[in-house]
Amino acid sequence: MSHAEKKIRVLIVDDSAVVRQMLAAIVTEQADMEVIGTAADPYFAVEKMRGNWPDVITLDVEMPRMDGITFLRKIMGSRPTPVVICSSLTEQGAETTMEALSAGAVAIFTKPQLGVKGFLQSSKQQLVEAIRSAATSRVGNIRPLSAGHRTQLQNQQERPASAALSKTTDKVIAIGTSTGGTIALERILSPLPADVAGLVIVQHMPEKFTAAFAQRLNGLCQIDVREACDGDRVRPGLALIAPGGRHMTLSRSGAFYHVQVRAGPVVNRHCPSVDVLFRSVARNAGRNACGIILTGMGDDGARGLLAMREAGANTYAQGEASCVVFGMPKEAIKHGGAEQVVELDDVPDVLIRQSRTH
């Protein structure tokens, strides 16, 4: 087999024998993947990895002996490796998953508590895509916020909001992202001042996780961060995140922007879709908008960003050097949607500048 056809070597870590067996069967069916081992917990996993390091690890976060998060932090500290988190669809599961993403996991795969077998069969595609996107990711680009930075932000939050909030602004910032986006958004939103323009954000993420993700960001940021509800007003100092499993669009009534949150078919294999959001922003905000596409696999958002640019919006794509997966930004650049390419650490300044120009 030539180097180009090298298989993705997968290690499966899960305390359920049924789940290990099912995941191994799905991975083995793929022509471009192979299972190099399965383990019931991190201690066994470490043994297996000694002489045979995987390209991707699928990791159950809720395990006895050593929990998945501790294991993940150890791996990221010693030899960063792409990790796909297998999480249950529970509130507790969602919080643990947010912690895992913050510790460096690159993708999520959800499993239910009941009827695991049937579910895994029907969700094959979700798992396979998560492993493929993890295999192409550059985990070295995942740099979580330091604890010191977090404390400093929490202290800042106690100050009264800036007086500039009382001024109305009709600027809207639209952001789209996928693989690697949870950490990218953490880094971008945390330094933003309370008077930044209203933000509407699509982060590809399964249902039930976006609320926990928004809550986590809300605790790290000076701005308010919420999972969007249908009819929410877009206002300065607020970031609205599209809920998993629903599309979010921007609409305008009089001087105000609102979001509409609706169930709908997948677009570019995603719901919420970045294209759906960006096209509505192009239509309803035009030159009053700023669009930015961040790290992620695939091409969702490329055409929508072009529509925004054609409508007079300022548009940006994240540069390759700071991306975990340079897929979505690359496609946006290729389609001519990005007016400028900007690295992750420069994005907050861009957004602050955009908020202040009328």
Image (cartoon, grey):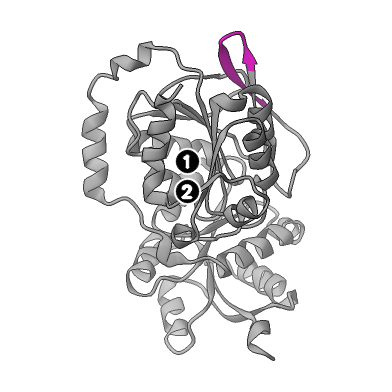
From which residue to which does the magenta span run?
A: 252-261
Asked if 19 appears above or below 152 in the picture, the reply is below
Instruction: Say the numbered circle drawn on residue 232.
Output: none
Instruction: Say the numbered circle drawn on residue 213.
Output: 1
Q: Quadrant of residue 221?
A: top left
Does the magenta stretch mainly form a helix, a strand or a loop? strand
Residue 104 in the magenta stretch? The answer is no
State the SS at label 1: helix
Q: Earlier in the sequence, mark 1 or mark 2?
A: 2
State the SS at label 2: helix
Question: Residue 10 appears at what percent x and percent y?
Answer: 58, 76
Q: Nearer the viewer, residue 317 or 95?
A: 317
Q: Amino acid at mark 1?
A: Phe
Mark 1 packing: few (<14 Cα in 10 Å), some, or many (20+)?
A: many
Q: Are marks 1 and 2 in contact (CB under 8 Å)?
A: yes
Question: Residue 34 appears at what percent x and percent y?
Answer: 65, 80
Q: Which residue is mark 2?
A: 182
Question: Residue 332 appears at what percent x and percent y?
Answer: 63, 50
Residue 274 shows up from this direction: no
In-image side of 180 versus 237 (left or right): right
